[in-house]
Image (cartoon, helix red, strand yellow):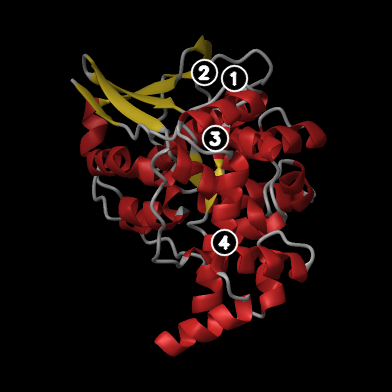
């Protein structure tokens, strides 16, 4: 038996939802770490993480994890953050999991909707006699930040299973992705389980009988924090052009992203990034301009924010530059455009 649901993005640019990394931010805040500084160092606007379903470039999340772990001297950041995390707290994805009544339903639901939480992340199951092996794979290179994220995901999955069984079960072993730098303490980190390293991806096994385990009502009845209550979810971008426009949209709150930061967010070198865009007949500067103008039109038409605030949100330091750019594309000023759109409604 092999059960696998994957989301293979044509864009090849992976994103994750803000709510997926909130537990890591909470952990860093708890120990007094300068979380916002680490986000900025990685090129992630802190304001982007205020809404649970916001899309964050996954490669920048890896940079954030690496920066925070190095600065705080935490070899096992992903594992430690997972100790108090719950998949049920992960926005709309978590709400879908909350509907499962058995471990089998929990995994089947998770396998089907994982692509809505992190683009390119994969979980799959394989049959090993009287056991089922749960495999996990994240997109990206073998950087310390990537390893923290991989360990975080596998540890949360294990923690949920332990809670379902009231800690009456633990895995016989945990196989981790190739890991030469991060250290694990098997007693503290994986509930006394043997850790086996140097695998192509992370995995662990569970008895087939555990799939029929009913999930206790108290496990699904956890009260959501107010900031998780958001019923809208933007779809993951498809195609390279849409993915790059999403990268730009995600990074604009911290100022106009240059091509080097956008390429890093896409997980490519700047040269490869430029070449890939050229292959589809566009350029970064063209997509940057189009994205800013499209967002400007939306915000002028559907919000009451002052023009200077909209300009700043789009990375324009001088509102006059925004006005010139907008007039150059639409032949009208931002104020006149807003008035015209108001007359149409």
Give the labeled residue for mark 3.
152
Side of 105 relative to 29 (left or right): left
Q: Which numbered circle lies on residue 293?
A: 4
Q: Residue at x 65, y 55 (%)?
A: 252
First in sequence: mark 2 vs mark 4: 2
Give the labeled residue for mark 1.
142
Between label 1 and label 4, give the one nearer the viewer: 4
First in sequence: mark 3 vs mark 4: 3
First in sequence: mark 2 vs mark 3: 3
Residue 185 placement (x, y as % from top left): 63, 23
Measured Cα–Cα span from mark 1 to mark 4: 37 Å
Label 3: few (<14), some (14–19) or many (≥20) C-alpha neighbours in 10 Å = many
Q: Secondary structure at mark 1?
A: loop
Label 2: few (<14), some (14–19) or many (≥20) C-alpha neighbours in 10 Å = many
Q: Secondary structure at mark 3?
A: helix
Give the labeled residue for mark 2.
177
Side of 119 relative to 6 (left or right): right
Image quadrant occupied by the N terminus: top left
Count of numbered labels shown in the rendering: 4
Measured Cα–Cα span from mark 1 to mark 3: 15 Å
First in sequence: mark 1 vs mark 2: 1
Callout 1–callout 2 Cβ contact below 8 Å:
yes
Residue 6 placement (x, y as % from top left): 32, 32
């Amino acid at each position: 038996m092999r059960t696998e649901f994957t989301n293979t993005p044509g864009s090849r640019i992976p994103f994750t939802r803000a709510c997926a990394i909130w537990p890591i931010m909470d952990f860093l805040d708890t120990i007094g770490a300068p979380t916002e500084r680490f986000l900025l160092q990685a090129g992630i606007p802190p304001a982007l993480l205020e809404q649970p379903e916001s899309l964050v470039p996954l490669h920048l999340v890896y940079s954030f994890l690496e920066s925070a772990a190095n600065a705080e001297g935490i070899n096992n950041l992903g594992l430690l953050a997972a100790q108090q995390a719950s998949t049920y707290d992960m926005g709309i994805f978590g709400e879908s999991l909350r509907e499962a009544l058995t471990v089998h339903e929990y995994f089947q639901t998770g396998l089907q909707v994982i692509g809505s939480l992190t683009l390119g992340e994969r979980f799959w199951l394989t049959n090993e006699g009287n056991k089922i092996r749960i495999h996990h794979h994240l997109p990206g290179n073998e950087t310390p930040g990537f390893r923290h994220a991989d360990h975080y995901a596998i540890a949360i999955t294990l923690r949920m299973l332990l809670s379902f069984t009231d800690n009456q079960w633990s895995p016989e072993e945990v196989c981790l992705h190739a890991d030469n730098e991060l250290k694990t303490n098997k007693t503290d980190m994986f509930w006394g389980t043997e850790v086996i390293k140097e695998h192509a991806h992370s995995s662990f096994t569970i008895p087939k009988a555990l799939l029929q385990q009913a999930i206790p009502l108290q496990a699904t009845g956890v009260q959501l924090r107010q900031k998780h209550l958001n019923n809208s979810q933007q779809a993951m971008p498809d195609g390279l052009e849409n993915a790059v426009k999403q990268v730009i949209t995600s990074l604009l709150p911290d100022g106009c992203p240059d091509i080097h930061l956008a390429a890093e967010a896409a997980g490519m070198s700047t040269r490869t990034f430029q070449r890939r865009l050229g292959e589809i007949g566009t350029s970064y500067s063209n997509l940057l301009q189009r994205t800013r103008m499209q967002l400007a039109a939306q915000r002028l038409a559907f919000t009451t924010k002052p023009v200077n605030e909209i300009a700043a949100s789009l990375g324009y330091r001088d509102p006059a530059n925004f006005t010139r750019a907008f007039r150059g594309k639409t032949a009208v000023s931002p104020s006149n455009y807003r008035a015209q759109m108001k007359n149409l409604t």
